[in-house]
Amino acid sequence: MTHDPQIARESLFTQVEVTAAGITSDALEREGDPAFSARLLRQILAAQDRQNELLEELLSQLGTAQKQRTTELGEWQKAHPGLARECGAAADVLARVQATFVSGLTREVLDNEENLLDGEFVLTELMDRFGPRLAHLNSLLHFLAQLSKPPKEAAPA
């Protein structure tokens, strides 16, 4: 079977003629008809109402999950008050470690600006060296900070 690339390329492209001739007089009459416009606006309004209902339902579900998480966190903190305070102290230590780590990262970037711009190897090595450790450090810091924060009071519904 022979394959002609010119024919294949031509079959990818088609011409579509878009002219006013495609609009019938019936369609033009409907556009000027106030009943048609009113019907169209009612359809748009119904679609927006449905969209608003869906957004309210989504917001309700997200709010319920957040309230449950806040409640569970508060119960955990009440059950382990000493550990919650220790998490706060550990988060403070990790925040200082993070600041030192980020300082080292910025020095490394500033010292190797030309190499980072010119060579992919130096950038890859920098990402491999700092990326995972920084990501894990940020995760640990966030986790400990969440456990140590007093839970927010649930807003009255």
Image (cartoon, rainbow, N blue to C red):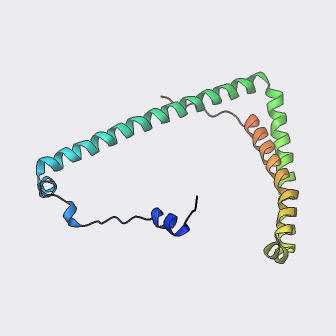
Does residue 34 lie above or below 85 as drawn?
below
Viewer-closest of 102 and 117: 117
Q: Quadrant of residue 107?
A: bottom right
Query: Which residue: 17% across, 50% down?
Result: 37
Q: Is there any visible trace of residue 103 in the rendered image?
A: no
Query: Which residue: 36% across, 66% down?
Result: 15
Total marks shown come to 0
Query: Which residue: 64% across, 26% down?
Result: 71
- x, y percent for residue 10: 46, 67
Viewer-closest of 38 and 4: 4
Does residue 117 lie above or below 152 as drawn?
below
Q: Is there any visible trace of residue 78 in the rendered image?
A: yes
Is residue 118 left or right of 62 when viewed as pictured?
A: right
Viewer-closest of 33 and 71: 33
Is residue 65 left or right of 93 when viewed as pictured?
A: left
Query: Which residue: 86% across, 73% down?
Result: 112
Viewer-closest of 3 and 93: 3
Q: Quadrant of residue 88?
A: top right
